Image: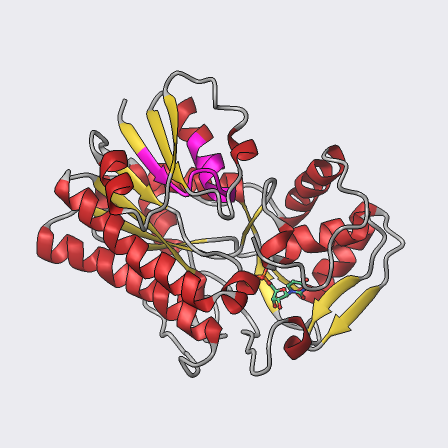
């Protein structure tokens, strides 16, 4: 049994990881400022005596120091997430990601904790080749474009993790998360699956951005958490980086049709130009497919749930929460 700190543990992925770690018998502390995470995500674990919640920001050095002290492992998930959020609040996103990572890594080094840092497939920028291996090139546009600034901030997080490992001997593992979806993911920050599902259940038009030919691979959060847990238990993962994601590629247009079919919704599918959905100059990647051979070779992991399983889980959750009422605007504000 180990003592874990999960920063951002009240968030979508964090809360699922917290449940998995507690189920393995570990002690788990969460540090979260509840900016995009929610206490309700932790409802199922709050009475567990091996769980504790700390309300605080990764930008608060004292709070981070106190949270890290006494821990064996730190999983740093706290970050600005969602394309909509990072386009609307670029400065906040950069500060949270870069300074937050420095503060957390510094504290982890102070207390000699194994540390996992969550990166993102956004670091590949608009490299639309596929499948992307961990060695694939980053292809970025101007740093004046918020999306590429965000991409750079996540790359800096990775570079910091590598540097702490190489220069200070901190055992770090970097995970690059591709599109991760499932129950508890909020539609408020732009993610397409929760948005389409809520739009369909509310009988509102599903808003496909661009021509809908862009493709993504959606991985169930339970599969991603399984991979995180395997890597955390794998000494050979230390000092390395791993892509995590599904290889089931689907276009956004096809996704919209799939959501309409599986919800039985009368909703139409409409198309919106990117500059209306996000901002002038916004660029999307045509394709984003991970090569996950590395994590498979090391841990035997592969995703067990397909896109239909994912959609059924997200639809069931949204129906259970009474979310089949109008509420998803085209440009729902972050936060
Ligand atoms: N998207 C869309 N409609 C929406 C939200 C997103 O068509 O209401 C598109 C978005 O432009 C992108 C894809 O769906 O091409 C995946 O978007 P998401 O924000 O979920 O992930 P990411 O862009 O980071 O892959």
Ligand 1 is located in which of the four quadrants?
bottom right
Q: Nearer the viewer, residue 110 or 212?
A: 110
Residue in view at x 57 percent, y 74 percent: 286
Q: Quadrant of residue 67?
A: top left
Looking at the image, is 38 positioned above or below residue 216? above
Residue 172 visible in the shown view = yes
Position of residue 100 measured from the top left corner of the image (x, y, whole percent): 31, 53
Does residue 97 appear to the left or right of 218 in the view shown?
left
Residue in view at x 53 percent, y 39 percent: 38
The quarter in which the N terminus is drawn is top left
Q: Nearer the viewer, residue 287 or 87?
A: 87
Position of residue 53 measured from the top left corner of the image (x, y, whole percent): 40, 30
Q: Is residue 139 magenta?
A: no
Position of residue 305 measured from the top left corner of the image (x, y, whole percent): 58, 42
Q: Quadrant of residue 121?
A: bottom left
Residue 133 visible in the shown view = no
Does residue 325 appear to the left or right of 233 in the view shown?
right
Looking at the image, is 77 positioned above or below residue 26? below
Position of residue 20 measured from the top left corner of the image (x, y, whole percent): 44, 30
Does residue 267 appear to the left or right of 17 in the view shown?
right
Q: Which color mode does the image show? A: secondary structure
- Numbered disc total: 0
The residue segment tinted magenta is 5-18
Q: Nearer the viewer, residue 124 or 332?
A: 332
Residue in view at x 22 percent, y 49 percent: 105
């Amino acid at each position: 049994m180990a003592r874990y700190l999960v920063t951002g543990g009240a968030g979508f992925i964090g809360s699922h990881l917290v449940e998995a770690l507690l189920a393995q018998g570990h002690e788990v502390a969460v540090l979260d400022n509840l900016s995009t995470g929610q206490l309700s995500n932790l409802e199922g674990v709050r009475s567990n005596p091996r769980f504790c919640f700390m309300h605080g920001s990764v930008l608060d050095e004292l709070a981070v120091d106190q949270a890290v002290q006494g821990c064996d492992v730190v999983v740093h998930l706290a970050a600005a997430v969602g394309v909509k959020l990072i386009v609307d609040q670029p400065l906040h996103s950069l500060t949270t990601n870069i300074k937050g990572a420095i503060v957390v890594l510094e504290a982890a080094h102070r207390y000699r904790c194994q540390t996992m840092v969550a990166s993102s497939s956004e670091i590949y920028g608009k490299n639309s080749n596929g499948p992307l291996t961990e060695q694939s090139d980053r292809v970025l546009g101007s740093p004046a474009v918020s999306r590429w600034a965000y991409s750079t901030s996540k790359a800096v997080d990775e570079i910091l993790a590598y540097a702490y490992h190489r220069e200070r001997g901190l055992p770090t593992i970097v995970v690059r998360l591709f599109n991760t979806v499932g129950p508890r993911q909020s539609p408020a920050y732009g993610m397409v699956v929760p948005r389409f599902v809520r739009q369909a259940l509310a009988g509102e038009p599903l808003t496909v951005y661009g021509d809908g030919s862009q493709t993504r691979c959606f991985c169930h959060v339970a599969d991603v958490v399984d991979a995180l847990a395997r890597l955390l238990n794998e000494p050979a993962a230390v000092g390395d980086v791993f892509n995590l994601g599904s290889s089931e590629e689907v276009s956004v247009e096809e996704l919209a049709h799939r959501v309409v079919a599986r919800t039985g919704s009368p909703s139409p599918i409409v198309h919106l130009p990117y500059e209306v959905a996000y901002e002038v100059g916004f660029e999307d990647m045509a394709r984003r497919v991970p090569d996950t051979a590395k994590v498979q070779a090391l841990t035997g992991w592969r995703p067990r749930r397909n896109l239909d399983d994912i959609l059924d889980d997200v639809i069931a959750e949204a129906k259970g929460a009474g979310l089949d009422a109008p509420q998803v605007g085209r440009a729902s504000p972050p936060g």
